[in-house]
Amino acid sequence: MIRWIRHGGAARTALLLWLTACAPVLLKATSASGRELWVLLAGFPLLAGAAAVARTRPLAGLAVAVGLSLALNVELYTSSYWAALALWGCLTGRWTAGARPALWFFAACSVAGALLAWVTDSGVWAWFTALTTLLFNVVLPWLLGRYRRQYEHLVRAGWELADRMEREQRAVADRARLRERSRIAGDMHDSLGHDLALIALRAAALQIDPELSDRHRAAAAELREAAAAATGQLRDIIGVLRTGDDPAPTAPADDGVGALVERARASGLAVELEYRKGYGKGYGHEGKGPEDKGHDDSAGDPHHETAPALPPMADRAVYRVVQEALTNATKHAPGAAVRVRLGRDREAGEIAVSVANGPRPADGTPPDPASGGNGLVGLDERVRLAGGVLAHGPSPDGGFEVSARLPLTAGVALVAERAAAPASTSARELARARQRVRRRLVESIAVPLAVTAGLAVLWGGFALYTQYHSVLDRGTYDRLQIGEPRADVESRMPPYTMDGPPDGVDAPPRGWDCAYYSVRRYEGRSAYRLCFVDGRLIAKDVVTSRL
C-alpha cells in the first residue's frame, strides 16, 4: 500500500489515507453516544486535514491521531484510532528526513500521558499502559517506516555507485580500444607506406626508361607523384590518429612471432614455441628456429616450405596476442613456463594462437601489481577488427591462457560483429549489497522487537504478580467496620490493589477515594470496593462488571 501511495497522485494519496484511518471510526460511531460520539465525529474533518498534508507534514497527522486517542482514553489505546496511529506512525518514519522531530514528539507524548494520568487521577498503571500503546502502536510502525526509508536510500546509492563504476569501466575500455586502433593504424602505415614507396620507385624507373614514349613517361611521372602524395597524406592522417602517450615502436614493422619469442627467451623467460598444422617457415616472416621445442604436424603438406601469407590485420593481431600474453606472464607469473602454440586449419579457414603460462612458482618472487586490465581490452578490439574472437581465463593447471582464432582470408573484419561483452559484476555485487542491507534491516527491526518483547514479559509478570497479591480475604472483608480509620483498614489489606474498577462499573461520588481488591485470583469481573472520606471508611461493597 505504501508503494501504491508513493506512486499515486496527491489527491489519491489523501483520499486513501483518510478512508483507511476513518474506517474504524465509522464503525465505532454507529454505536457511540454522548461525549464519545462527539469526539468520533470531530475525527472525520481532523483526519481529512491530516491526510491532506500527510506527504509534507506527516508528524502533524500523527499528532492529530494521538490527540483524538487521548481524548477518548487516557491510556491512549482506542479501537477507533488504532489504525490512524499505526498508519501515521509508519508514514512519519517513511516521509520524515530526520529522526529527531519524531523522537521529541514521542517524549512529549510520554510527558503528556503522565500529566493526564496525574490530573485525572488514573494512576501510574494508566500511564504505563499509555507508554506501552505508544511503543507498540506508534513507535514500532515508525521504526518500520524509518528503516524502509534508509533501505531505499542505500539501494539507490548502490545503483548510482554501480552505474558510475560501469560508466568509468566503459570509458576506460573505450580509451583502450581507441589506443589499439591507433596502433593498428600505425601498423598499416608502416605496411602501406612501404608498398607506396615501392610503387613510386617503379614509376620513377618507368619515367626514365628511354624505350617508352613521352606520353607513357609523363603518365609514369604522374603515377610517381600520386604515390608520393598518397604517402604524405597517409603519414598526416596517421599522425592525427596517434595519441601522445603511445610509445615509439622498438621492433621492426615486419617483426614476427618467432623473433618475438627469441627476444623473450633471451631476456630470461622460459618460453617454448610450437607450430602445428601447417605453421611452417612461411608464417610470420620467419621459420621455426632450431631452439624451438615444438613439433610440426605439416611434414606432408605441400605448402610446408611456403605457407600462404596471412592478411595483414590477422598477421599483426597474432603478433599482438603473443606479445600481450608474454607481457602478462612476465608481470603476473614471473618464473613460470610459457608455451606458445600456433596452428592453421585450412578446412575451417582460420588460424589459432594460444599462449599459456603455468602457475607462478612459490619462490617468493612477487608479481607486478601495476596492471589496469586494459591490455586485454585493446587486444580484444584488435582481434575483433581482424574478424576473430579472443578468449582468456585461468587454465586447468592453475595458470592463465590467452587464445584467439582469426580468419585466413581478408575482408572478414568488415562484417565481423563485436563479441558480446562479458557480463559485468556490478549487478552481482549490488545484489549481494542488497542482501547485506536487508539482513541489517532485519537485525535493526529485531532488536527493538526483542526489547519490546522483554518489556511485555516484564509487564505481564508484574501484572500477574500484582493480581496474585491483590486478593482480599472474604473474612477480612466481613470484619471491616464502617468508620474505621484508614490506617487500620490498610494494615489488614493485601499489598497491591487492582489498577481500576471492573469495566462498566459506575464511578463513585465526587470526593470519595476508593480502592478495589480482587475477589478471586486472575478474575477481574468483580471486586471489593472500599471508599474513604477524611481518612475513614465510609462504604464497602462488591461491584461487578456490566460488560
Image (cartoon, rainbow, N blue to C red):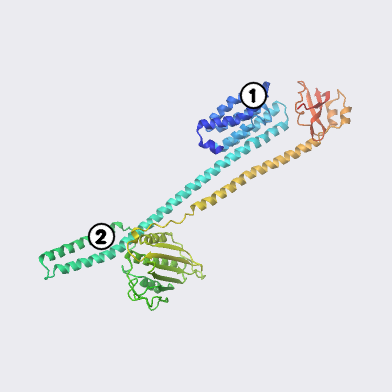
Label 1, residues with CA under 10 Å away: few <14, some 14-19, many ≥20: some
Tell me the tag on residue 116: none
Q: Determine the residue positioned at 16% across, 68% down.
A: 206
Q: Is residue 484 visible?
A: yes
Residue 154 x %, y %: 53, 45
Q: Determine the residue positioned at 55% across, 30% down.
A: 15
Q: Quadrant of the C terminus?
A: top right
C-alpha span from label 2 to label 1:
91 Å
Q: Helix or strand or loop: what does disc 2 sit on?
A: helix
| Vertical side of 368 occupied by 481: above or below | above
Report how many numbered discs are placed on residues in the image.
Answer: 2
Q: Is residue 104 visible?
A: no
The residue singled out by tag 2 in the image is 234
On the rendered structure, is 419 left or right of 515? left
- Amino acid at pointer 1: Val
| Vertical side of 248 occupied by 465: above or below | above
| Vertical side of 285 occupied by 29: above or below | above
Q: Determine the residue positioned at 13% across, 70% down.
A: 209
Residue 364 x %, y %: 51, 69
The residue singled out by tag 1 in the image is 39
